[in-house]
Image (cartoon, rainbow, N blue to C red):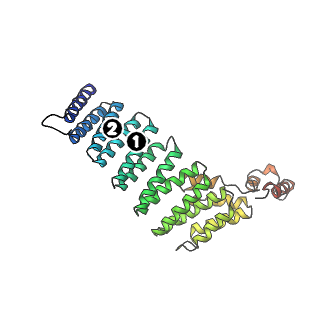
C-alpha cells in the first residue's frame, strides 16, 4: 500500500514537471496545474507516512501558487508543510512554517485564518515550549482584537494568562489579566470580570503587592452585580485575612470551592498562598496538639516569631 502511494506521488511530480515546461506553442509554465499535481503528490506521500517528502511536495506546491499569485493557497500549503514537521516531532520547524503561513494569510487579507492557525500552533507547541505558546496565543489574540472579534481575542488572552502564571511570570500575568478583564467588561460578560478579579488578587498577592490586589477589588465595585456577590465577599475576606496575617482565614478562603475549582493554574495559586509573617502557624497549631495548647508557651513563642518573620512585608 505504501509503495503504491509513493509510486503515485512520483507520477504526480512527473506531471507537475511537465506542466512547467515551455515550448514553441506553450510560452508560459502552467503554475496552477503544477501546484495541483504537487498537492496530490504531497497527499500520497502523507498517506504513505513519508512525511519529509510530503513536506517537500507541499513547499513546491506553495512555490507555484506564489508564482501564480494565489497567495492564500500558497499559505495553506506552507501550513501543511508545518504539519508534516509536526508528524516528525520537529516542533520548532513546524511552528516556523505555520508562522510564515500566518504572515501570508495576513498579507492576503484573511486575518481570521491567520489567527486560527496561530492558535493551532500554540496548542501544538504548548506541551513542550510554554514560552512560545504564550507568544503565539498573544499574537492570535492581537489579530482577533484588530478585527473587533473580542470574544475570540479574550479567549486566547486567557490561555496566555494561564501559561504566564504557570511560568511564574507574574508581573506579565497581572498585565494580561487586566487586559482580559477590560475586554470582558467591553462585551458585558460581567460574571467573567468577577472571575478575573479573583485571579488578579491571587496573582498580586503572590507578587507580594497587597495594594494592587486591593485596588483590583475596589475597581470591580463599579461592575454590575459585583458588590455583595460571592466572588466579592470571598476576596474581601481573603484580603482582610492577608492584611491581618490571619492564616486560618486565608486558608479557609483559598480552599473554598469558589477558588479550588478555578482554572488549575489559578487554583494552585490559591492553595499555595501564604500570609507574610504567618507561615501557616495557626493552622498547624490546631492540627498538631504536641506544639502546645493555644495560649501556652508554644503559642506565645509562635506569636513572638510572627512579629519579626515577615520583615518589612
196 vs 31: above or below:
below
Q: Are marks 1 and 2 in contact (CB under 8 Å)?
A: no
| Mark 1 Cα-neighbour bin, 10 Å: few <14, some 14–19, many ≥20 | many
Can you give x and y, in whole percent of width and height, for residue 48 in the image?
Answer: 30, 30
SS at badge 1: helix
Residue at left offset 35%, top offset 51%: 105
Residue 230 appears at what percent x and percent y? 57, 68
Q: Quadrant of the N terminus?
A: top left
Marks 1 and 2 sit apart, C-alpha to C-alpha, by 10 Å
Which residue is at the front of the view, 162 or 58? 58
**Rendered residue at 59%/58% (across/down):** 174
Q: Is residue 53 visible?
A: yes
Q: Is residue 2 above or below residue 219?
A: above
239 left or right of 71 in image: right
Q: Is residue 142 left or right of residue 218?
A: left
- Image quarter where the C terminus lies is bottom right
Is residue 137 positioned above or below 250 on the image? Answer: above
- Say left or right for 188 vs 37: right
| Image quarter of residue 46 | top left
Answer with left or right where residue 269 lies relative to residue 112.
right
Most foreground residue, 170 or 272: 170
Count numbered badges in the picture: 2
* Residue pictured at 29% horizontal, 35% vertical: 42
On the question of residue 233 being in view, the answer is no
Q: x, y (%) of residue 223? A: 54, 72
**Residue on which the image places disc 2:** 59
Q: Which residue is mark 1?
A: 97
The image shows residue 140 at horizontal and vertical percentages of 44, 53
Label 2 SS: helix
Amino acid at each position: 500500500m505504501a509503495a503504491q502511494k509513493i509510486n503515485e506521488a512520483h507520477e504526480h511530480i512527473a506531471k507537475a514537471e511537465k506542466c512547467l515546461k515551455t515550448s514553441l506553442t506553450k510560452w508560459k509554465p502552467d503554475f496552477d496545474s503544477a501546484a495541483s499535481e504537487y498537492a496530490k503528490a504531497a497527499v500520497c506521500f502523507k498517506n504513505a507516512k513519508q512525511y519529509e517528502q510530503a513536506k517537500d511536495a507541499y513547499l513546491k506546491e506553495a512555490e507555484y501558487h506564489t508564482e501564480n499569485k494565489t497567495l492564500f493557497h500558497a499559505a495553506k500549503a506552507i501550513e501543511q508543510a508545518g504539519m508534516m514537521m509536526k508528524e516528525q516531532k520537529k516542533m520548532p520547524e513546524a511552528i516556523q512554517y505555520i508562522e510564515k503561513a500566518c504572515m501570508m494569510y495576513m498579507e492576503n487579507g484573511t486575518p481570521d485564518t491567520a489567527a486560527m492557525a496561530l492558535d493551532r500552533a500554540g496548542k501544538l507547541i504548548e506541551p513542550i515550549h510554554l514560552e512560545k505558546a504564550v507568544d503565539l496565543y498573544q499574537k492570535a489574540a492581537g489579530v482577533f482584537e484588530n478585527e473587533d472579534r473580542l470574544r475570540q481575542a479574550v479567549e486566547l488572552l486567557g490561555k496566555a494568562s494561564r501559561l504566564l502564571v504557570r511560568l511564574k511570570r507574574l508581573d506579565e500575568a497581572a498585565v494580561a489579566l487586566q487586559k482580559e478583564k477590560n475586554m470582558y467588561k467591553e462585551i458585558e460578560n460581567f460574571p467573567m470580570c468577577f472571575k478575573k478579579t479573583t485571579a488578579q488578587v491571587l496573582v498580586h498577592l503572590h507578587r507580594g503587592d497587597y495594594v494592587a490586589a486591593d485596588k483590583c477589588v475596589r475597581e470591580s465595585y463599579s461592575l454590575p452585580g459585583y458588590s455583595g456577590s460571592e466572588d466579592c465577599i470571598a476576596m474581601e475576606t481573603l484580603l482582610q485575612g492577608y492584611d491581618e496575617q490571619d492564616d486560618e482565614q486565608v486558608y479557609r478562603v483559598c480552599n473554598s470551592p469558589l477558588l479550588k475549582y478555578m482554572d488549575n493554574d489559578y487554583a494552585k495559586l490559591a492553595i499555595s498562598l501564604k500570609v507574610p509573617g504567618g507561615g501557616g502557624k495557626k493552622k498547624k497549631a490546631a492540627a498538631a496538639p504536641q506544639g502546645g495548647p493555644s495560649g501556652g508557651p508554644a503559642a506565645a513563642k509562635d506569636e513572638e516569631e510572627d512579629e519579626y518573620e515577615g520583615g518589612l512585608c
